[in-house]
Amino acid sequence: MARKSDDKGDADSRPIPTGRASRFARMARLATGVAGGMVAEGTRQLRAGNRLKAKDLLLTPDNARRVAEQLATMRGAAMKVGQMLSMDNGEFLPKELADILARLRDDARHMPVEQLCEAMIEAYGPEWEKQFYGFDMKPLAAASIGQVHRTISPDGRDIVLKVQYPGVAASIDSDVDNIASLLRMSGLLPSDVDIQPLLEDAKAQLKDEADYLKEAKHLQAFRQKLGGDDRYLLPEVLPELTHRNVLAMTYVNGDPIEGLLDRPQSERDSVMTALFDLMLHEIFELRMVQTDPNFANYLYRHQTGEIVLLDFGATRRFKAEFVNNYKKLVRAAIAGDEARLVAQAEKLGYAMGDPGGEYRDMVMQLLAVGMEPLRENVAYDFAQSDMSRRLSRLAEDITRHHDAWRPPPIDAIYFHRKVGGMFLLATRLRARVNVHRLLQPILA
Protein backbone atom coordinates (compact mmCIF):
# COMPACT_ATOMS: atom_id res chain seq x y z
CA MET A 1 0.00 0.00 0.00
CA ALA A 2 1.41 3.37 -1.03
CA ARG A 3 1.21 6.71 0.73
CA LYS A 4 -0.13 9.14 -1.86
CA SER A 5 0.96 12.73 -2.27
CA ASP A 6 -0.63 15.60 -4.13
CA ASP A 7 1.59 17.19 -6.79
CA LYS A 8 -0.77 20.10 -7.39
CA GLY A 9 1.01 23.30 -6.58
CA ASP A 10 4.24 21.43 -5.87
CA ALA A 11 6.94 23.66 -7.34
CA ASP A 12 9.50 20.84 -7.04
CA SER A 13 7.48 18.44 -9.22
CA ARG A 14 7.89 18.84 -12.99
CA PRO A 15 6.96 16.40 -15.79
CA ILE A 16 10.07 15.10 -17.54
CA PRO A 17 10.07 15.25 -21.36
CA THR A 18 10.67 11.67 -22.46
CA GLY A 19 10.66 11.64 -26.28
CA ARG A 20 13.70 12.57 -28.36
CA ALA A 21 11.69 15.13 -30.32
CA SER A 22 10.31 16.85 -27.21
CA ARG A 23 13.74 16.99 -25.58
CA PHE A 24 15.29 18.44 -28.75
CA ALA A 25 12.49 21.00 -28.92
CA ARG A 26 13.31 22.11 -25.37
CA MET A 27 16.97 22.53 -26.29
CA ALA A 28 15.96 24.56 -29.36
CA ARG A 29 13.73 26.79 -27.22
CA LEU A 30 16.58 27.20 -24.78
CA ALA A 31 18.93 28.30 -27.56
CA THR A 32 16.31 30.73 -28.88
CA GLY A 33 15.64 32.15 -25.42
CA VAL A 34 19.35 32.63 -24.75
CA ALA A 35 19.82 34.37 -28.09
CA GLY A 36 16.83 36.62 -27.40
CA GLY A 37 18.26 37.44 -23.99
CA MET A 38 21.54 38.45 -25.63
CA VAL A 39 19.77 40.78 -28.05
CA ALA A 40 17.72 42.39 -25.25
CA GLU A 41 20.78 42.86 -23.02
CA GLY A 42 22.82 44.20 -25.95
CA THR A 43 20.13 46.76 -26.77
CA ARG A 44 19.93 47.85 -23.14
CA GLN A 45 23.71 48.23 -22.87
CA LEU A 46 23.93 50.19 -26.13
CA ARG A 47 21.30 52.62 -24.90
CA ALA A 48 23.38 53.09 -21.77
CA GLY A 49 26.42 53.82 -23.94
CA ASN A 50 28.19 50.53 -23.15
CA ARG A 51 29.70 48.03 -25.58
CA LEU A 52 30.15 44.48 -24.31
CA LYS A 53 31.68 41.33 -25.78
CA ALA A 54 29.38 38.52 -26.91
CA LYS A 55 30.43 36.39 -23.92
CA ASP A 56 29.36 39.14 -21.52
CA LEU A 57 25.97 39.34 -23.22
CA LEU A 58 25.56 35.55 -23.10
CA LEU A 59 26.35 35.12 -19.42
CA THR A 60 23.66 37.43 -18.02
CA PRO A 61 21.63 36.52 -14.89
CA ASP A 62 18.50 35.93 -17.02
CA ASN A 63 20.35 33.60 -19.38
CA ALA A 64 21.91 31.82 -16.41
CA ARG A 65 18.42 31.20 -15.07
CA ARG A 66 17.21 29.95 -18.47
CA VAL A 67 20.04 27.44 -18.82
CA ALA A 68 19.84 26.13 -15.24
CA GLU A 69 16.04 25.82 -15.19
CA GLN A 70 15.76 24.12 -18.57
CA LEU A 71 18.46 21.55 -17.83
CA ALA A 72 16.97 20.92 -14.39
CA THR A 73 13.54 20.30 -15.95
CA MET A 74 14.96 17.88 -18.53
CA ARG A 75 17.11 15.99 -16.01
CA GLY A 76 18.88 12.97 -17.44
CA ALA A 77 22.03 13.34 -19.50
CA ALA A 78 21.36 17.03 -20.23
CA MET A 79 21.51 17.86 -16.53
CA LYS A 80 24.30 15.37 -15.84
CA VAL A 81 26.58 16.84 -18.51
CA GLY A 82 25.99 20.28 -16.99
CA GLN A 83 26.96 18.92 -13.57
CA MET A 84 30.05 17.20 -14.99
CA LEU A 85 31.25 20.31 -16.80
CA SER A 86 30.65 22.50 -13.76
CA MET A 87 33.17 20.49 -11.72
CA ASP A 88 36.10 20.77 -14.13
CA ASN A 89 37.80 23.75 -12.46
CA GLY A 90 37.84 25.84 -15.62
CA GLU A 91 39.37 23.16 -17.84
CA PHE A 92 36.60 23.50 -20.44
CA LEU A 93 34.22 26.33 -19.60
CA PRO A 94 34.51 29.95 -18.53
CA LYS A 95 34.17 30.31 -14.77
CA GLU A 96 30.92 32.26 -15.23
CA LEU A 97 29.20 29.39 -17.06
CA ALA A 98 30.65 26.82 -14.64
CA ASP A 99 29.02 28.79 -11.82
CA ILE A 100 25.70 28.69 -13.69
CA LEU A 101 25.89 24.93 -14.15
CA ALA A 102 26.94 24.45 -10.54
CA ARG A 103 23.36 25.33 -9.56
CA LEU A 104 22.29 22.00 -11.02
CA ARG A 105 24.17 20.07 -8.33
CA ASP A 106 21.69 21.28 -5.71
CA ASP A 107 18.51 20.98 -7.78
CA ALA A 108 15.86 18.81 -6.12
CA ARG A 109 12.94 18.65 -8.58
CA HIS A 110 11.16 15.33 -8.95
CA MET A 111 8.76 13.72 -11.40
CA PRO A 112 4.97 13.76 -10.92
CA VAL A 113 3.21 10.73 -9.44
CA GLU A 114 1.93 9.67 -12.87
CA GLN A 115 5.43 9.29 -14.28
CA LEU A 116 6.63 7.62 -11.09
CA CYS A 117 3.89 5.01 -11.42
CA GLU A 118 4.86 4.40 -15.05
CA ALA A 119 8.41 3.63 -13.98
CA MET A 120 7.26 1.33 -11.18
CA ILE A 121 4.89 -0.53 -13.51
CA GLU A 122 7.77 -1.04 -15.97
CA ALA A 123 9.83 -2.67 -13.21
CA TYR A 124 7.25 -4.59 -11.15
CA GLY A 125 4.08 -4.81 -13.25
CA PRO A 126 0.64 -3.17 -12.88
CA GLU A 127 0.13 -4.41 -9.31
CA TRP A 128 3.45 -3.10 -8.03
CA GLU A 129 1.87 -1.41 -5.00
CA LYS A 130 0.98 -4.81 -3.54
CA GLN A 131 4.68 -5.69 -3.28
CA PHE A 132 5.48 -2.88 -0.84
CA TYR A 133 4.04 -1.42 2.34
CA GLY A 134 3.94 2.30 3.03
CA PHE A 135 5.58 3.35 -0.26
CA ASP A 136 6.11 7.11 0.07
CA MET A 137 5.26 8.88 -3.18
CA LYS A 138 7.32 11.90 -2.17
CA PRO A 139 11.03 11.18 -2.71
CA LEU A 140 13.70 11.39 -0.05
CA ALA A 141 16.05 12.81 -2.69
CA ALA A 142 16.05 13.67 -6.38
CA ALA A 143 19.02 13.86 -8.73
CA SER A 144 19.82 14.02 -12.43
CA ILE A 145 18.98 10.42 -13.41
CA GLY A 146 16.60 9.19 -10.71
CA GLN A 147 14.93 9.80 -7.36
CA VAL A 148 14.84 7.83 -4.11
CA HIS A 149 11.70 6.60 -2.30
CA ARG A 150 11.39 4.95 1.10
CA THR A 151 9.22 1.88 1.66
CA ILE A 152 8.99 -1.51 3.42
CA SER A 153 10.08 -4.66 1.53
CA PRO A 154 7.90 -7.81 1.34
CA ASP A 155 10.04 -9.40 4.11
CA GLY A 156 9.56 -6.38 6.39
CA ARG A 157 12.88 -4.56 5.93
CA ASP A 158 13.16 -0.78 5.81
CA ILE A 159 14.41 -0.08 2.28
CA VAL A 160 14.73 2.58 -0.40
CA LEU A 161 14.03 2.33 -4.12
CA LYS A 162 16.08 4.45 -6.52
CA VAL A 163 13.68 4.98 -9.44
CA GLN A 164 15.01 6.14 -12.80
CA TYR A 165 13.25 8.93 -14.69
CA PRO A 166 11.40 7.66 -17.80
CA GLY A 167 13.24 8.14 -21.08
CA VAL A 168 16.61 8.97 -19.49
CA ALA A 169 18.56 6.00 -20.87
CA ALA A 170 17.16 6.36 -24.40
CA SER A 171 17.96 10.09 -24.59
CA ILE A 172 21.63 10.00 -23.53
CA ASP A 173 23.23 10.23 -27.00
CA SER A 174 20.93 12.98 -28.25
CA ASP A 175 21.14 14.96 -24.99
CA VAL A 176 24.94 14.98 -24.99
CA ASP A 177 25.07 15.94 -28.67
CA ASN A 178 22.52 18.72 -28.16
CA ILE A 179 24.41 20.18 -25.19
CA ALA A 180 27.65 20.12 -27.19
CA SER A 181 25.93 21.86 -30.13
CA LEU A 182 24.53 24.54 -27.83
CA LEU A 183 27.98 25.22 -26.37
CA ARG A 184 29.53 25.38 -29.83
CA MET A 185 26.87 27.73 -31.24
CA SER A 186 27.18 29.98 -28.21
CA GLY A 187 30.90 30.45 -28.82
CA LEU A 188 31.70 29.41 -25.26
CA LEU A 189 33.85 26.54 -26.55
CA PRO A 190 36.68 27.55 -28.90
CA SER A 191 36.22 26.05 -32.36
CA ASP A 192 39.73 24.57 -32.34
CA VAL A 193 39.22 22.56 -29.13
CA ASP A 194 38.24 18.94 -29.77
CA ILE A 195 36.11 17.65 -26.92
CA GLN A 196 34.52 14.85 -28.97
CA PRO A 197 36.51 12.10 -27.18
CA LEU A 198 35.26 13.44 -23.84
CA LEU A 199 31.68 13.56 -25.12
CA GLU A 200 31.84 9.98 -26.40
CA ASP A 201 33.26 8.82 -23.08
CA ALA A 202 30.57 10.80 -21.24
CA LYS A 203 27.91 8.94 -23.23
CA ALA A 204 29.39 5.58 -22.25
CA GLN A 205 29.72 6.62 -18.61
CA LEU A 206 26.14 7.91 -18.49
CA LYS A 207 24.80 4.70 -20.04
CA ASP A 208 26.56 2.77 -17.28
CA GLU A 209 25.01 5.08 -14.68
CA ALA A 210 21.57 4.55 -16.20
CA ASP A 211 21.94 0.76 -15.80
CA TYR A 212 21.00 0.14 -12.17
CA LEU A 213 21.98 -3.53 -12.46
CA LYS A 214 25.57 -2.31 -13.00
CA GLU A 215 25.30 0.11 -10.09
CA ALA A 216 24.13 -2.77 -7.91
CA LYS A 217 27.29 -4.71 -8.84
CA HIS A 218 29.45 -1.69 -8.02
CA LEU A 219 27.78 -1.31 -4.62
CA GLN A 220 28.24 -5.00 -3.88
CA ALA A 221 31.92 -4.78 -4.90
CA PHE A 222 32.54 -1.83 -2.56
CA ARG A 223 30.71 -3.60 0.28
CA GLN A 224 32.97 -6.61 -0.21
CA LYS A 225 36.17 -4.51 -0.30
CA LEU A 226 35.25 -2.24 2.63
CA GLY A 227 33.26 -4.72 4.72
CA GLY A 228 36.02 -5.11 7.32
CA ASP A 229 36.53 -1.37 7.84
CA ASP A 230 34.25 -0.05 10.58
CA ARG A 231 34.80 3.57 9.47
CA TYR A 232 32.39 3.12 6.56
CA LEU A 233 28.80 1.91 6.25
CA LEU A 234 27.16 1.01 2.93
CA PRO A 235 23.60 -0.04 2.02
CA GLU A 236 22.90 -3.65 1.09
CA VAL A 237 21.50 -4.46 -2.36
CA LEU A 238 18.25 -6.43 -2.64
CA PRO A 239 18.84 -8.32 -5.93
CA GLU A 240 15.36 -9.83 -6.02
CA LEU A 241 13.79 -6.35 -6.13
CA THR A 242 16.40 -4.64 -8.34
CA HIS A 243 15.78 -3.98 -12.04
CA ARG A 244 17.52 -2.01 -14.76
CA ASN A 245 15.45 1.08 -13.90
CA VAL A 246 14.93 0.54 -10.14
CA LEU A 247 17.66 -0.14 -7.56
CA ALA A 248 16.49 -1.62 -4.24
CA MET A 249 18.70 -1.15 -1.15
CA THR A 250 18.41 -1.24 2.61
CA TYR A 251 17.74 2.16 4.16
CA VAL A 252 20.75 3.61 5.95
CA ASN A 253 20.25 6.89 7.78
CA GLY A 254 22.67 9.60 8.80
CA ASP A 255 23.12 13.35 8.91
CA PRO A 256 24.38 15.47 6.01
CA ILE A 257 28.17 15.49 5.96
CA GLU A 258 28.24 19.31 6.08
CA GLY A 259 26.74 19.09 9.58
CA LEU A 260 30.22 18.17 10.77
CA LEU A 261 31.08 21.86 10.65
CA ASP A 262 29.56 22.17 14.14
CA ARG A 263 31.65 19.28 15.54
CA PRO A 264 35.08 19.54 17.23
CA GLN A 265 38.18 20.05 15.06
CA SER A 266 39.51 16.58 15.89
CA GLU A 267 36.31 14.92 14.70
CA ARG A 268 36.29 16.88 11.44
CA ASP A 269 39.92 16.00 10.86
CA SER A 270 39.26 12.32 11.56
CA VAL A 271 36.34 12.09 9.13
CA MET A 272 38.18 13.88 6.32
CA THR A 273 41.26 11.71 6.92
CA ALA A 274 39.06 8.63 6.49
CA LEU A 275 37.60 10.02 3.25
CA PHE A 276 41.01 10.89 1.81
CA ASP A 277 42.26 7.44 2.82
CA LEU A 278 39.29 5.89 1.02
CA MET A 279 39.92 7.94 -2.13
CA LEU A 280 43.60 6.91 -2.25
CA HIS A 281 42.61 3.28 -1.65
CA GLU A 282 40.06 3.48 -4.49
CA ILE A 283 42.47 4.77 -7.13
CA PHE A 284 45.79 3.17 -6.19
CA GLU A 285 44.69 -0.20 -4.82
CA LEU A 286 41.16 -1.01 -6.01
CA ARG A 287 41.52 0.94 -9.31
CA MET A 288 37.77 1.50 -8.91
CA VAL A 289 36.65 5.04 -8.05
CA GLN A 290 33.25 6.51 -7.24
CA THR A 291 33.85 9.68 -9.26
CA ASP A 292 30.78 11.76 -8.35
CA PRO A 293 31.93 14.52 -5.93
CA ASN A 294 28.43 15.45 -4.72
CA PHE A 295 28.41 16.01 -0.95
CA ALA A 296 25.00 14.29 -0.75
CA ASN A 297 26.78 10.97 -1.41
CA TYR A 298 28.14 11.09 2.16
CA LEU A 299 26.25 10.96 5.45
CA TYR A 300 27.65 10.88 8.96
CA ARG A 301 26.50 9.06 12.10
CA HIS A 302 27.59 11.12 15.11
CA GLN A 303 26.80 8.36 17.62
CA THR A 304 29.05 5.75 15.99
CA GLY A 305 31.45 7.88 13.91
CA GLU A 306 30.52 5.90 10.78
CA ILE A 307 30.58 7.51 7.34
CA VAL A 308 27.68 6.37 5.17
CA LEU A 309 28.63 5.94 1.48
CA LEU A 310 25.86 6.31 -1.10
CA ASP A 311 25.37 6.31 -4.89
CA PHE A 312 27.82 4.17 -6.86
CA GLY A 313 26.38 4.84 -10.33
CA ALA A 314 29.38 6.99 -11.33
CA THR A 315 31.90 4.27 -10.45
CA ARG A 316 34.75 4.13 -12.95
CA ARG A 317 37.37 1.40 -13.32
CA PHE A 318 40.90 2.54 -14.19
CA LYS A 319 43.53 0.61 -16.11
CA ALA A 320 46.69 -0.45 -14.29
CA GLU A 321 48.84 1.59 -16.70
CA PHE A 322 47.08 4.84 -15.80
CA VAL A 323 47.27 4.13 -12.07
CA ASN A 324 50.96 3.18 -12.18
CA ASN A 325 51.88 6.26 -14.22
CA TYR A 326 49.88 8.49 -11.89
CA LYS A 327 51.66 6.96 -8.90
CA LYS A 328 55.01 7.79 -10.53
CA LEU A 329 53.77 11.33 -11.18
CA VAL A 330 52.96 11.76 -7.49
CA ARG A 331 56.35 10.34 -6.46
CA ALA A 332 58.12 12.81 -8.77
CA ALA A 333 56.05 15.73 -7.43
CA ILE A 334 56.84 14.86 -3.81
CA ALA A 335 60.54 14.45 -4.63
CA GLY A 336 60.62 17.76 -6.52
CA ASP A 337 62.04 15.98 -9.60
CA GLU A 338 60.89 18.26 -12.43
CA ALA A 339 62.32 16.15 -15.27
CA ARG A 340 60.55 13.00 -14.06
CA LEU A 341 57.37 14.97 -13.40
CA VAL A 342 57.28 16.21 -17.01
CA ALA A 343 58.03 12.73 -18.37
CA GLN A 344 55.25 11.10 -16.35
CA ALA A 345 52.75 13.86 -17.18
CA GLU A 346 53.41 13.33 -20.89
CA LYS A 347 53.04 9.56 -20.46
CA LEU A 348 49.62 10.18 -18.94
CA GLY A 349 48.64 12.33 -21.93
CA TYR A 350 49.02 15.88 -20.62
CA ALA A 351 50.10 18.58 -23.07
CA MET A 352 53.26 20.00 -21.48
CA GLY A 353 54.41 22.44 -24.18
CA ASP A 354 58.00 23.28 -25.12
CA PRO A 355 60.86 23.26 -22.57
CA GLY A 356 61.40 26.75 -21.17
CA GLY A 357 58.15 28.04 -22.68
CA GLU A 358 55.46 30.04 -20.88
CA TYR A 359 52.88 27.29 -21.35
CA ARG A 360 55.04 24.62 -19.70
CA ASP A 361 55.80 26.98 -16.84
CA MET A 362 52.08 27.51 -16.19
CA VAL A 363 51.33 23.77 -16.34
CA MET A 364 54.14 23.09 -13.86
CA GLN A 365 52.70 25.75 -11.56
CA LEU A 366 49.27 24.10 -11.86
CA LEU A 367 50.69 20.69 -10.94
CA ALA A 368 52.66 22.18 -8.05
CA VAL A 369 49.58 23.87 -6.60
CA GLY A 370 47.44 20.75 -7.02
CA MET A 371 50.05 18.60 -5.26
CA GLU A 372 50.50 20.99 -2.29
CA PRO A 373 48.61 18.84 0.25
CA LEU A 374 50.79 15.82 -0.66
CA ARG A 375 54.29 17.26 -0.46
CA GLU A 376 54.95 17.84 3.24
CA ASN A 377 54.60 15.42 6.16
CA VAL A 378 52.25 17.76 8.05
CA ALA A 379 48.51 18.21 8.43
CA TYR A 380 47.42 20.42 5.51
CA ASP A 381 45.02 23.13 6.70
CA PHE A 382 42.42 23.36 3.95
CA ALA A 383 40.55 26.21 5.64
CA GLN A 384 43.62 28.46 5.48
CA SER A 385 44.48 27.55 1.88
CA ASP A 386 43.55 29.53 -1.23
CA MET A 387 44.48 26.55 -3.41
CA SER A 388 41.12 26.35 -5.23
CA ARG A 389 41.29 30.01 -6.26
CA ARG A 390 44.86 29.63 -7.53
CA LEU A 391 43.98 26.44 -9.45
CA SER A 392 41.00 28.12 -11.13
CA ARG A 393 43.07 31.15 -12.12
CA LEU A 394 45.91 29.03 -13.54
CA ALA A 395 43.53 26.73 -15.43
CA GLU A 396 41.80 29.73 -16.98
CA ASP A 397 45.15 31.18 -18.08
CA ILE A 398 46.30 27.85 -19.52
CA THR A 399 43.22 27.37 -21.69
CA ARG A 400 43.91 30.71 -23.40
CA HIS A 401 46.99 29.14 -25.03
CA HIS A 402 44.98 27.56 -27.85
CA ASP A 403 48.12 26.63 -29.77
CA ALA A 404 49.46 24.38 -26.98
CA TRP A 405 46.45 23.46 -24.83
CA ARG A 406 44.40 20.33 -25.30
CA PRO A 407 41.91 18.62 -22.97
CA PRO A 408 43.54 16.55 -20.21
CA PRO A 409 43.41 12.74 -20.48
CA ILE A 410 39.86 11.50 -19.89
CA ASP A 411 40.73 9.22 -16.97
CA ALA A 412 42.54 12.12 -15.30
CA ILE A 413 39.46 14.35 -15.70
CA TYR A 414 37.26 11.85 -13.86
CA PHE A 415 39.82 11.31 -11.10
CA HIS A 416 40.37 15.07 -10.75
CA ARG A 417 36.62 15.51 -10.24
CA LYS A 418 36.88 13.18 -7.26
CA VAL A 419 40.02 14.89 -5.92
CA GLY A 420 38.47 18.33 -6.43
CA GLY A 421 35.37 17.22 -4.53
CA MET A 422 37.50 16.01 -1.61
CA PHE A 423 39.47 19.27 -1.51
CA LEU A 424 36.22 21.25 -1.60
CA LEU A 425 34.65 19.21 1.20
CA ALA A 426 37.79 19.48 3.35
CA THR A 427 37.73 23.25 2.82
CA ARG A 428 34.03 23.44 3.67
CA LEU A 429 34.59 21.49 6.90
CA ARG A 430 37.75 23.46 7.76
CA ALA A 431 39.61 20.17 8.17
CA ARG A 432 43.32 19.43 8.55
CA VAL A 433 44.62 16.24 6.91
CA ASN A 434 48.12 14.77 6.59
CA VAL A 435 47.68 13.44 3.05
CA HIS A 436 51.44 12.87 2.74
CA ARG A 437 51.36 10.30 5.56
CA LEU A 438 48.36 8.51 4.02
CA LEU A 439 50.25 8.20 0.72
CA GLN A 440 53.46 6.68 2.09
CA PRO A 441 52.31 3.04 2.38
CA ILE A 442 50.82 3.26 -1.13
CA LEU A 443 53.89 4.80 -2.77
CA ALA A 444 56.17 2.33 -1.00
Image: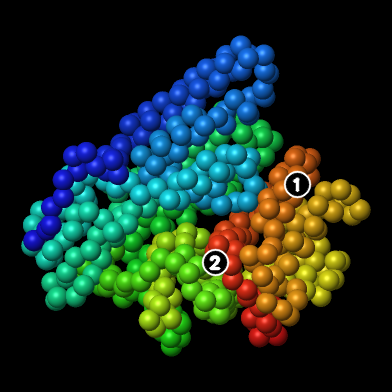
Q: Nearer the viewer, residue 222 or 90?
A: 90
Tell me the quarter of the picture where residue 341 sits. bottom right
Query: What's the residue type where badge 1 is placed?
Result: Ile
Left or right side of 105 for 380: right
- Residue at 19 percent across and 47 percent down: it is 113
Spot the residue most to the top: 47
Q: Secondary structure at mark 1?
A: helix
Q: Nearer the viewer, residue 404 or 228?
A: 228
Tell me the quarter of the picture where residue 300 sits. bottom left
The numbered mark at residue 429 is 2
Q: CA distance from mark 1 to mark 2?
A: 30 Å
Measuring from the top left, give residue 211's x and y in whole percent.
Answer: 35, 58
Q: Dot 1 corresponds to which residue? A: 398
How many numbered marks have been drawn onto this rendered protein structure? 2
Say how the picture is coloured: rainbow
- Residue at 61 percent across and 11 percent down: it is 47
Measuring from the top left, give residue 2's x and y in whole percent.
Answer: 11, 58
Question: Is residue 246 positioned above or below 73 on the image?
Answer: below
- Residue at 67 percent across and 35 percent down: it is 190
Tell me the quarter of the picture where residue 335 sits. bottom right
The quadrant of the rendering that contains the N terminus is bottom left
Using a 10 Å C-alpha cutoff, classify the residue at mark 1 as few (fewer than 14 neighbours), some (14 to 19) or many (20 or more): many
Using a 10 Å C-alpha cutoff, classify the residue at mark 2 as few (fewer than 14 neighbours), some (14 to 19) or many (20 or more): many
Query: What's the residue type where badge 2 is placed?
Result: Leu
Measuring from the top left, give residue 339's x and y in whole percent.
Answer: 86, 66
